[in-house]
Amino acid sequence: MRRSIFWLNYALLVVVQLLLSNFLRVSPYMMLTILPFMVLCISIRVGTVGAMFIAAATGLVVDFLTEGVIGLNTISLIPVAFCRNGIIRLVFGTELFARREDFSPQRNGFSKTLLALLIAQSLFLLIYIWIDSAGMRSLSFNAIRFGVSLVTGMLVSLFTLGILAPDPRR
């Protein structure tokens, strides 16, 4: 039952990402995305290859249904899925894998969750901005875009934290 609720929430957040991508283009300096957070929240019971397939499917759905470049979200999201277990091990330690449980901010701490989100979001944005600019934008523009997108993406992801990573004690 808990897994089906997760995947329903995951699908709803894909719709939220579609709305963000299509209707909240405030500035060329800001890109709102919750995709790295969504991939980070996939259960650790799903292996790396499975997470990469889920990330690819999610990225393709977002790419095809938004006005962006086809494949850009996909190519940026797959490395996040590939590094997901490493990020979780680095930030939360190996006990999550030993106990076969998913991370939650309530159990593992908000600061650790914020650090894991920062790493995943940064990896996604570095690849996305590097490929999207393709040498046509200046370094200062890309640096500002990275910083603004990182802050806004993390804020939006924090608002959705309770949806994909709920308190397991409830």
Image: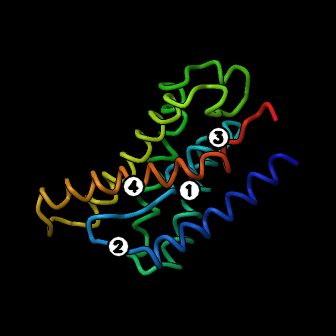
Marks 3 and 2 sit apart, C-alpha to C-alpha, by 36 Å
Which residue type carries mark 2?
Val
Name the residue located 71 percent from the left edge and 58 percent from the top edge.
9
Quadrant of residue 88 within the rendered picture = top right
Quadrant where the C terminus is found in the figure = top right
Q: Nearer the viewer, residue 100 or 24?
A: 24
Of labels 1 and 3, the one closer to you: 1
As helix, strand or loop, the secondary structure at mark 4 comes to: helix
Disc 2, SS: loop
What crowding class fits label 3: few (fewer than 14 Cα within 10 Å), some (14-19), or many (20 or more)?
some
Please tell me which of labels 1 and 3 falls first in the chain: 3
Q: Earlier in the sequence, mark 3 or mark 4?
A: 3
Q: Position of residue 80 (x, y in %)?
A: 47, 47
SS for callout 3? loop
Say which residue label 3 marks. 47
Q: Is residue 46 left or right of residue 147?
A: right
Residue 152's disc is 4
Q: Residues within 10 Å of mark 1 (few under 14, many from 20)?
A: many
Residue wearing tag 1: 55
Horizontal side of 80 relative to 15 (left or right) equals: left
Q: Earlier in the sequence, mark 1 or mark 2?
A: 2
Amino acid at pointer 1: Ala
- Circle number at residue 26: 2
Distance between the alpha carbons at the discs numbered 1 and 4: 21 Å
Amino acid tagged 3: Gly
Q: Is residue 42 left or right of residue 130?
A: right
Spatial CA distance of label 1 from label 3 is: 12 Å
